[in-house]
Image (cartoon, helix red, strand yellow):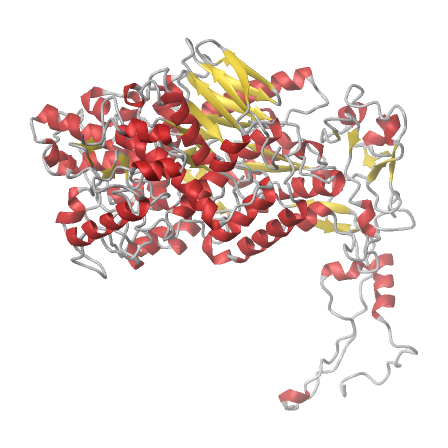
């Protein structure tokens, strides 16, 4: 048995109410490591023969996979991966959350949960070591994330306390969905605790569609031992030293200083739904922003992490002495609930993100979607009649929060439409307004149905410096998994990080990541073999995205739809250090051609047969025959 | 030194810092409990009388400009020490002080404790725990190390767990003052749980496999290890200085003898101005 792994998965069929133990062959673990790559493989294996295109992501046929990698629990940092067929892209997104849930899973002795079917009434899972119970959750259904988390844990802990008084009930780890997930809003997240979300890809909607309110895990076993303990101790010590010395990076400011860094230095911050990407509001700088809000500098709850990129914020309430407590909005949240709306007041932004978290949204996705509605209102495509009397004016946080509530409840036709995610909402609005879809899609800043993270590509100064960063990425607009013309330029690192599963902010360079995996699993990994792992993950995800279905597919006339939103080509940046810059179609074409060539895609963007077979993926090759031009 | 009154005789022998400290420890500092007498279990009574220093009338000195390089401290009779330095004679661990505002909830202390005691990462077998309550209240839970327990009436008794143990295997260590288990084989385990019941902080944990009691002994084996300097594993591991090994206690040790919920309620008041009861902590 390789080190690091707990060695077994739990397959939970909610329709039948059964729990089964699954062991994967060592060859699979070796070739897919864990996390995102292994999750993509599991999802693909289970859905490929249905066939893939026919599976509705929100139907009982879909699977929800929650899993970790071999290093989790032994590594100073945390990542739990949630995957399945995404209701936004209809492909596979490896959505990850930073929380100690991964260590709790290892301590309970599970590498992952594969959840299938649909429960007839709301349930939650109580995982206590080897025992997995499916319990009634109708009491908690409809509650917001904070309230639901507190209610579930309170009941569970008092029950345990009565049963085992001297084994004092500890606080278990929990993953749950909020009202957005229950109502199958496609931008819903799986929330771990209160603020740590696996957001991208909309797996909260998948969890909600299975009538699964929460997964609660508590383990009493030791973390599985690494294969080479001495090597692991050395790597662990070195990585902790390195991370604690990077004080200025995240330990001091968290990611919150990004509002200034990306808004002013690199001109890649979304402002008014990406109309602009540069600002000079000094209030967005860390001295005003972070110092104005936070009460605790160090806070993470990530397993053994010394980086602590999360900070705690408190917000004053009108007329009440009690403070509201929140995670200090990180950079992405500040951008997608602040600058994208032209809101710069730290307290207002914090209140917006608190509400979005409480409703259980993918904050990046819903922020982009609602900003899109704001812009349509500005352009006159949406009117007061459509919004139910709300005026969607830039900078109006009250209207923003009202929209968040409306979409979570799917109120009115606009709430219904926006609950479908930005891409589908654009199609729906175009249909309703009798407009050509391109005209509305022009304002929808998304790729493959996944709304963009807050790093623009027009300025070329951010790390998303390639024009194909989002357009050809298998995770669409997910900023944590961007594409680069050659896989070794950038793309390999996020894939290996998500598979290991390392964290972006605490992870070692890719060669040391190979050492980590070697020391922990006992198999030999090098950068070259990791490239194969990354390619396998990439090919499965690419095939799943291209096949898509049932409602949306990303292939048209045998050609992959790898395009940027129209705005990036048409509108130059209106201000900032690189004013006037936009995406050059020639550069885009060249980078795309390089990408296709180095990744083994044909000129239509579909992976070639021989490449897939060399990677040991003949089933992917056969499935892709359905979209290849005859 | 020209200003020094001539009537005062120079001392026979220069007062060393150590002598001075002895004097201090006997009577000069009031209101501070000193953490190491003959036995750590029995503290010397608090000394509340303070000798008022005799004021000396010194004539106003004639001001003479002195080159900066020649300035020497004048009139300074006692070394200026940082408060902890007064207790350098007693470098023995006494209490692990917790600063919840610096705790990030990363569980490195838990990991370090289980690695030191069990040889693997095993939080359930750790003697220190972190409770992740809602709204970012991360509470460190650990033995309060009460060497004696003072009732409101003033009577003093041994720590409640020591008194409650039906097989009498708990005692206060002479080396560190922490509660140690003399014969772990005799422990009746979580089914008995009398020590847990008696503790106002609901502290002792039980091992998940052997079901024997787990009590923090302040890493007794590290006390004599010069490389470790008596610093417990959890204190060494904390990256945020949320844990400190103290050899004196500025407040009552009872500060920490609370359940995690009680502590969380206190902190919620301090940080968020929330008036909540311990049973409302979730």
- From the viewer's side, name the closer residue of A333 and A423: A423
Is residue A173 shown left or right of residue A478?
A: right
Across and down, in percent, residue B59 comes to 74, 82
Does the rendering let one see residue A56? yes
In-image side of A480 versus A548 (left or right): right
- What's the residue at 70%, 20% (across, down)? A165
Q: Hey, which quadrant is residue A548 in on the image?
A: top left
Q: Can residue B242 be seen in this view?
A: no
User: In which quadrant of the rendered image does the C terminus of chain A lie?
Assistant: top left
Q: Which of A337 and A623 is in front in this view?
A: A623
Q: Quadrant of residue A574?
A: bottom left
Vertical placement of residue A151 versus A16, above or below = below
Q: Residue B260: x percent and y percent?
A: 64, 32
- Residue A558 lies, with reference to residue B240, above or below; the image says above
Q: Nearer the viewer, residue A255 or A57?
A: A57
Q: Which residue is drawn at 18% across and 52% down?
A: A583
Q: Nearer the viewer, residue A61 or A184?
A: A61
Question: In what quadrant of the picture does the N terminus of chain A appear?
Answer: top right
The residue sitting at 62% across, 23% down in the picture is A129
Q: Is residue A96 above or below residue A626?
A: below
């Amino acid at each position: 048995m390789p080190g690091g792994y707990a060695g077994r998965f739990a397959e939970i069929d909610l329709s039948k109410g059964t729990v089964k133990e699954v062991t994967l062959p060592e060859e699979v673990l070796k070739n897919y490591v864990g996390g995102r790559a292994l999750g993509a493989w599991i999802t693909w294996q289970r859905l490929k023969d249905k066939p893939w295109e026919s599976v509705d992501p929100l139907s009982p046929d879909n699977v929800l996979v929650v899993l970790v990698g071999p290093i989790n629990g032994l590594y100073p940092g945390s990542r739990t991966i949630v995957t399945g067929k995404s209701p936004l892209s209809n492909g596979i997104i490896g959505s990850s959350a930073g929380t100690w849930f991964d260590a709790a899973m290892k301590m309970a002795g599970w590498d992952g949960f594969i959840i299938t079917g649909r429960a007839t009434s709301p349930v939650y899972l109580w995982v206590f070591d080897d025992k997995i119970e499916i319990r009634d959750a109708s009491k908690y259904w409809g509650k917001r994330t904070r309230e639901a988390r507190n209610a579930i844990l309170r009941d569970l802990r008092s029950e345990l306390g009565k049963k085992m008084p001297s084994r004092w009930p500890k606080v278990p780890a929990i993953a749950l969905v909020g009202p957005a997930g229950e109502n199958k809003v496609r931008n819903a997240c799986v929330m771990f605790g209160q603020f740590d979300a696996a957001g991208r890809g909309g797996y909260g909607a998948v969890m909600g569609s299975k009538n699964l309110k929460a997964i609660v895990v508590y383990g009493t076993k030791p973390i599985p031992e690494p294969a080479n303990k001495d090597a692991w101790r050395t790597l662990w010590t070195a990585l902790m030293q390195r991370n604690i010395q990077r004080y200025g990076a995240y330990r001091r400011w968290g990611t919150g200083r990004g509002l200034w860094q990306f808004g002013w230095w690199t001109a890649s911050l979304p402002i008014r739904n990406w109309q602009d990407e540069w600002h000079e509001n000094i209030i967005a700088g860390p001295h005003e922003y972070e110092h104005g809000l936070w009460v605790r500098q160090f806070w993470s709850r990530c397993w053994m992490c010394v980086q602590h990129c999360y900070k705690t914020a408190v917000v004053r309430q009108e007329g009440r002495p009690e403070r509201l407590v929140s995670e200090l909005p990180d950079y992405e949240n500040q951008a997608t609930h602040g600058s994208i709306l032209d809101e710069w007041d730290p307290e207002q932004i914090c209140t917006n993100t608190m509400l979005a978290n409480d409703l259980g949204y993918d904050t990046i996705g819903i922020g982009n979607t609602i900003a899109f509605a704001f812009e349509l209102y500005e352009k006159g495509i949406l009117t007061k009649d459509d919004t139910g009397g709300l005026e969607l004016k830039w900078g109006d946080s009250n209207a923003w929060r009202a929209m968040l509530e409306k979409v979570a409840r799917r109120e009115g036709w606009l709430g219904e439409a926006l609950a479908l995610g930005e891409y589908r909402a654009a199609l729906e609005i175009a249909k309703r307004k009798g407009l050509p879809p391109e005209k509305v899609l022009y304002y929808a800043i998304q790729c493959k149905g996944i709304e963009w993270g807050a790093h623009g590509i027009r300025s070329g100064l951010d790390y998303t410096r390639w024009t194909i960063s989002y357009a050809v990425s298998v995770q669409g607009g997910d900023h944590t998994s961007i594409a680069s013309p050659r896989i070794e330029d950038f793309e390999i690192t996020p894939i290996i990080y998500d598979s290991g599963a390392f964290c972006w902010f605490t992870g070692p360079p890719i060669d040391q990541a190979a050492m980590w995996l070697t020391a922990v699993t006992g198999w030999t990994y090098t950068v070259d073999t990791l490239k194969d792992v990354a390619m396998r993950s990439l090919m499965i995800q690419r095939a799943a995205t291209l096949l898509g279905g049932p409602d949306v597919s990303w292939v048209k006339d045998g050609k992959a739809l790898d395009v940027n939103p129209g705005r990036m080509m048409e509108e130059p940046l209106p201000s900032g250090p690189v004013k006037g810059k936009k995406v050059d179609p020639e550069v885009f074409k060249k980078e795309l051609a390089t990408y296709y060539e180095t990744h083994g895609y044909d000129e239509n963007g579909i992976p070639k047969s021989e490449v897939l077979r060399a990677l040991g993926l003949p089933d992917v090759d056969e499935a892709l025959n359905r979209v290849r031009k005859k | 030194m020209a200003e020094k009154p001539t009537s005062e005789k120079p001392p026979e022998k220069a007062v060393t810092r150590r002598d001075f400290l002895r004097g201090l420890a006997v009577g000069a500092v009031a209101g501070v409990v000193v953490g190491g007498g003959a036995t750590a279990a029995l503290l010397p009574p608090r000394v509340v009388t303070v000798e008022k220093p005799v004021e000396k009338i010194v004539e106003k000195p004639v001001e003479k400009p002195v080159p900066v390089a020649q300035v020497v401290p004048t009139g300074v009779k006692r070394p200026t020490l940082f408060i902890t330095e007064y207790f350098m004679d007693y470098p023995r661990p006494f209490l692990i002080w917790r600063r919840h505002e610096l705790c990030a909830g990363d569980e490195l202390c838990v990991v370090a404790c289980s690695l030191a005691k069990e040889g693997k990462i095993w939080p359930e077998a750790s003697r220190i725990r972190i409770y992740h309550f809602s709204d970012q209240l991360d509470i460190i839970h650990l033995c309060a190390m009460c060497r004696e327990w003072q009732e409101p009436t003033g009577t003093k008794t041994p720590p409640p767990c020591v008194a409650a143990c039906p097989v009498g295997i708990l005692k206060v260590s002479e080396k560190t003052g922490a509660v140690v288990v003399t014969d772990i084989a005799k422990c009746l385990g979580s089914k008995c749980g009398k020590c847990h019941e008696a503790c106002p902080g609901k502290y002792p944990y039980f091992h998940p496999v052997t079901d024997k009691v787990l009590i923090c002994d302040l890493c007794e084996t590290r006390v004599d290890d010069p490389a470790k300097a008596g610093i417990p594993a959890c204190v060494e591991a904390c990256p945020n200085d949320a844990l400190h090994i103290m050899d004196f206690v500025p407040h009552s040790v009872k500060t920490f003898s609370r359940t995690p919920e009680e502590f969380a309620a206190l902190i919620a008041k301090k940080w968020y101005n929330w008036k909540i009861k311990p049973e409302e902590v979730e």
